[in-house]
Amino acid sequence: MSGASGERRGSGAIVDLSRPSGEGALAGGGELTVEVLVIGSGAGGATAAWELARAGHEVLVVEEGGDYVGAALTGRDGAMYDQLYMERGGRSTADLAIAILQGRVLGGGTVINAADVVPIPDGVARFWQTKHGLSDFSPEALAPFKAAALEDLSASTPGERQINANNALLREGAQALGLRHEIMMHNRVGCVGTGTCLIGCPMNAKKNARFVAIPRALEAGARFFVRARAVRLDDAGAEVKRVTLRTLDPKGYREERTLTVRAKIVILAANAIASAQLLLRSSVGNEHVGRHVMLQPQLPVTAFFDREIRFFRGIPQSTAVTEYERLDDPDRGFWGFRIESIAGTPGIVASMLPKLGLPGKEVMSRYAHMAASLLLVPDAPNGTITVDRAGNPVVAYAMPDEQKARYRDAIKAAARVYFAAGARSVQVPYARPLLLESPRDLDRVDALGFEPATAPFISAHQQGSVRFAASPRDGGASPEGLVHGARDVFVLDSSGFPSSASSHTMTPIMTVSRMLARRIAARRAG
C-alpha cells in the first residue's frame, strides 16, 4: 500500500490527495497559494525543494505517483510497473521502437533506477561551456555541487563481495581482452542483494531522493502532495502563476477533482518528457520547447553459460566496459558506447527476449544460466516532443545510420567479451533472433538494420527537451533554467541538458538542480 496521508516531519507533510482527508478542505478541490511550486519529486525536484525550503521559502511539491517504500515495494513485476512507472511502463516513442521508462512515484526515477552514480564528466561540462555558451557550467563551477550530490547519495564503490557473477563475468571477459573497464559507484547502504532495484528496494537501501532530499525538505517545512497531476500552467508571464492540478484515485488510474495552485515561482522537474509536455499543453515557452530531445536508447544483449549465473540475485549493475566511450569528444561531448552488466526480474527480462510462446518459455527456462548487458549509445539531440489533442506526449525519434553503426559495433564488442569469459552463445534480441555461437559469427551482426520496432530498445535517460542556451535563438531556457518568455518559471531537471550529461543522469540532475536552486534562492533573498 502507499504511504499514509499526512505523514509529517518537522513542519512539512506528505499528503495523499487521493484520500478524503487529504489536505483538509482541499480534498474536494479549491485553490491554494504558495510561494514556490515544484512539479516532480525526483532527483531534480526533491533537491530543489530541499534547497529552497532550507533557505526559508514556502515550498509545495506535487507528484503524480504515490508514496511507495519498504514492504509496499512487493517485488511483483505487474503491480510495481503498474504503480512506479509512467503509463504502467508502457510509454514509448510514436513508432513503438523505443520503450520509455519514466518514474511515477514519490522520489521519481531515483526509486526505480539501478542505483548507479556517474557524475557529469569534466569533458562534458567543458563541452557545454565552450560549445553551448553555458559559461557557468565549467568543471570548476560544478565541482562543489557535484561533491554535494555524491555526499547526498552516500556514493561508494561496491565491495568485491557485492559484485555478482553476472558483473564478474563482464569484468573477466574485459580483462582477458585487455579492455578498459570499471566498477561504477552506487548509492546503496545496507544492500542485501534482492535484485529488484528496477521495481524499488524493499529494504530502503537506496540513498535516493525519497530518503535524503525529501526528508530534509520536510524538516525545513516543505509540503509534498502525491496523486496530484499538473495539467496546465497559466499566467506564466505574471508575478503569480496558476497551475491546475487534478487529483487522482488511490491507484492513479483516474482524475477526480480539480485544484488550483497559485505560485510566484514554478519549478518544472518532472522529467524531460513531462516538463516539456506541461509547457506545450500550456503554450508556454518558445519554439525550442519539445525539440533537441535525447533518449540515449539502450539495447540488451544476453549470453548463456553452462554454469549457473543467477544474474537476478545481487546488485544488477556494477561493471562497465568503458574502452569504447569518449567523455571529451570535441563535437559531441559524451560519445562512443559503453557496455554495462544488467539484470531484471522475470517479467521485464521475458519482454525483451526475442521469442514468444513455447520458444520463449524454453529460453526463460535457462534464466539461471543467463548473463546480460545493456549497450548504452549516447545520441545526438534529434528527437521531438509534441502533444496530441488530449494533451498526451507524442515522442518522435528517428535513429540515424551513424548511431545504428555504433549499436552494431557495441553488439560485436559485447559478444567478444562474453565469449572471452566462456559463454556458450550470445543472443541478440531482434525480430528475427540472432544467435551467435562463436566469434566467427560476428559478421552476421552487420545485417541488422534496426528498423522501427525490430529490437527492444529502452530509454531510461531522457534529456534535452527545454535545453539551456545563452540565447532564446538556441534553446528553450536560459543558463539559469528560466523558461524563455516566462517569468520565474524554471526547468531544473534533465530537460535543460544540451547534450548527454553522462551514462546515468541521477547525479547530473542533482548537481545542476542544486546549483540553479541556490541561485534562485539567492536572487529572491537579494
Image (cartoon, rainbow, N blue to C red):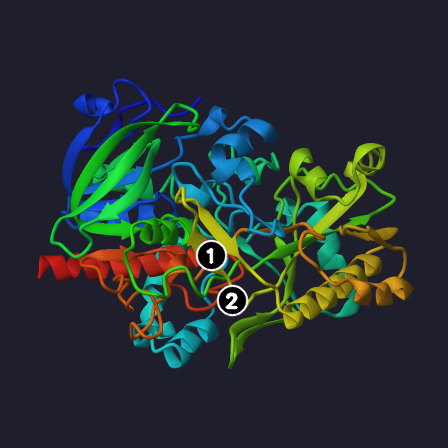
The residue wearing badge 2 is 382
Q: Residues within 10 Å of mark 1 (few under 14, many from 20)?
A: many
Does dot 2 land on a helix, a strand or a loop?
Answer: loop
Q: Position of residue 443 (x, y in %)?
A: 85, 67
The residue wearing badge 1 is 505
Q: Nearer the viewer, residue 413 or 445?
A: 445
Among numbered discs 1 and 2, the one appearing first in the sequence: 2
Residue projecting furthest to the left: 526
**Residue at left offset 37%, top offset 48%:** 270
* Residue 352 against residue 475 in the figure, above or below: above
**Residue at left offset 44%, top offset 28%:** 253
Q: Position of residue 43 (x, y in %)?
A: 38, 49
In 3D space, how far apart are the residues under numbered discs 1 and 2 (Cα atoms)? 18 Å
* Left or right, 448 with reference to 30: right
Q: Nearer the viewer, residue 382 or 417?
A: 382
**Residue at left offset 77%, top offset 37%:** 367
Residue type for callout 1: Thr
Q: Nearer the viewer, residue 72 or 134?
A: 134
